[in-house]
Amino acid sequence: MTSAERTAKEDMPLEVRLLSNYIVPPQKPSAPVQMEASHSVLPSSPDDVSFLRLPDVKLVTGLSKSSLYALIRAESFPAPVRLGTRTVAWVRSEVKEWAVERISTSRSAASHLSSRRMPQRALGEDWASSKKFA
């Protein structure tokens, strides 16, 4: 390390210096697993069946692992498909359907709430002005 590099490194905050010692690879989603039409079990769309592994499902939904499995137990999220003895994945189209349904449910609930009358404050402005510190 040259003296210029050493001086530049000393000028950095401690957190940056500590983190610069470690090379952290960027996190990228795993590649989707494609399945040929001849191996498809479901006749609905045999040409375009792909799977998402857990890190990809978490990225798509924004939910944690425990939240996903809680929704699966409540039958509010599609269950994973077993690919092997210790491997599961979610069908991409089912996760996409869930997301679209969740968006439409959220938007319709938001429009319903905006039409409702909001409750008024129980204590008016007179209460705040009657206090010495207000």
Image (tube, rainbow, N blue to C red):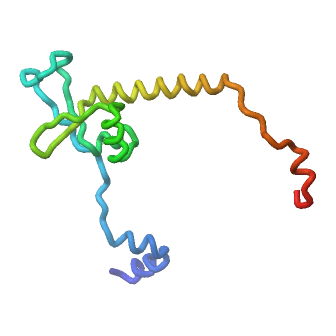
Where does residue 104 sit, x and y in percent of width and height?
47, 23
Note whether 128 is above or below 81 in the view shown.
below
Furthest-top residue in this view: 44
Where does residue 63 sit, x and y in percent of width and height?
39, 43
Q: Residue at x 66, y 22 (%)?
A: 115
Could you tell me which quadrant the C terminus lies in?
A: bottom right
- Position of 40 with respect to 45 (left or right) is left
- Position of 1 with respect to 118 (left or right) is left
Note whether 100 is above or below 85 in the view shown.
above
Could you tell me which quadrant the N terminus lies in?
A: bottom left
Note whether 7 is above or below 89 in the view shown.
below
Where does residue 88 sit, x and y in percent of width and height?
18, 40
Closer to the camera in the image, 59 or 109: 109
Q: Residue at x 10, y 25 (%)?
A: 36
Furthest-left residue in this view: 38
Q: Residue at x 15, y 37 (%)?
A: 82
Asked where in the image residue 53 lies, by quadrant, the reply is: top left
Asked where in the image residue 34 lies, by quadrant, the reply is: top left
Where does residue 37 sit, x and y in percent of width and height?
11, 21
Asked where in the image residue 124 lies, by quadrant, the reply is: top right
Total marks shown come to 0
Q: Residue at x 19, y 26 (%)?
A: 49
Note whether 58 is above or below 119 in the view shown.
below
- Position of 118 with respect to 54 (left or right) is right
